[in-house]
Each structure stands twice: as structure tokens, then as C-alpha cells.
Amino acid sequence: MSTPTPPDLRPALAELLSWQQAHLNDDRFPPHDAAALRADLEAFAEGRAWDARQQGWWEHSVKVLVANALAQPQIATRAGRMGPVLQDLALLLRGPDQAYEEEVELDAAIRWWEAARKVGLPLGEDFGELWQQFDWTGLLMHLTLLGQAGPQDLLMAHAVKVVTRYVALSPLAALLQEIQGGLMETGFTLR
């Protein structure tokens, strides 16, 4: 049985894990705390004239995304600071120029998670929980990049995919729909 992880992605996953393992107890990197995470996200909100309802949606979204990032074990990241354990994996699989199918992302994340647990990275036993944290970590990154670089279709597509998946992010889904419009469709299926 073949797996969906492309052969060229496997060395990148192994290299990431090797780097993370080598820097696991490296505390010389500065922390990326709640204030820094909020500042990253505020770049997305900068210059937007939101009404009170939209501002409430945004504040809720920032709160849950920052809480998710801080709930993860903090380790050294390739950005040169401490950050969520899933930050570099999210950048590898959902970076601004990456468009892998979800089955590839899942397979690669499972491979990384299994190997990372074996080498001592502080990860839980529930892959479903890790996947949700991965989604939200990627979303935080995408919103930050959208705030810095402006609209980009791939980043917005990544963001929409995540916000429509989780009830806790539904205020952000509504906000993105109002900002850009035409991003989401409602559909039903009988199965």
C-alpha cells in the first residue's frame, strides 16, 4: 500500500524532526508570549473599519487562537524563538507556497507525530487533538501572513478550510465571509 506523503516531503519531515530534537532543551531563544502572538494577529486587523459585532468576532478569534498556541508545549522554532511545538510543522505543510491535499497533510503529520513522540518531543497520545492544534496553529500563521502581505488566495483558502471546520471558529468564518465574500458555500448531502 502506498502512502500519500510525496517522497520529496519525507526528507523535509526528517530534517525538521532532527532540528527539533537537537534544539529540544535549547532555552536561549526568546519566548513568543501572548502579547507577541496578539501583535502578530493584529496585523490582520490593522486598517480595517469593523463594527462592534465584527470587532467582537475578531477578539473572540484572537483569544481562542492565542490560547491554542500557548496550550501547546513551547519549544525552539526555526523562527529563532520559542513557540508552539506544531509551528514549524504547520509552516512546512501549510506554508504560504504549499498546497498539499489534506490526505498528504494528514499522512505527513501522522508520520511526524509518531517519530516525534519516539524521540521525546512533548506531544500527547491523541492525534485528533494534535490535528486540531495543528489546524489552529496554521490558521494563526495564515492570518499573520495575510496581515503582513495582504490578500493571497492560497492563504485565504487555507484559513477558510480551517474556520469552517470548528464551531469555536465560526465567528471568524463569518468575519472572513464579510471581509472577502464568496469564500464559503453552504451545501447539504444525504448519506
Image (cartoon, helix red, strand yellow):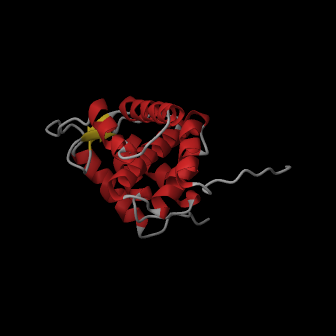
As displayed, is residue 7 above or below residue 84? below
Position of 191 compared to 64: left or right? right
The spot of residue 139 in percent (x, y) is 45, 46
Q: Identify the residue at the far left of this view.
A: 28
Between 59 and 35, which is closer to the camera in this rendering? 59
Give me the residue at 20% from left, 47% from top.
80
Label total for image = 0
Residue 43, percent from left and from top: 33, 46
Q: Horizontal placement of 4 versus 142: left or right?
A: right
Q: Is residue 33 visible?
A: no
Image quadrant occupied by the N terminus: bottom right
Horizontally, residue 15 falls left or right of residue 54, namely: left
Tell me what residue is drawn at x 33 percent, y 36 percent. Answer: 38
Does the image show residue 39? yes
The spot of residue 105 in percent (x, y) is 51, 56
* Residue at horizontal 42 percent and vertical 35 percent from the top: 62
Q: Position of residue 117 (x, y in %)?
A: 40, 40
3 lies above or below 188: below
Question: As rendered, which of 30 and 115 lies closer to the eye?
Answer: 30
Give residue 151's quadrant in the image: bottom left
Residue 152 in which image quadrant: bottom left
- Which of 92/19 is in front? 92
- Where is residue 59, by image quadrant? top left
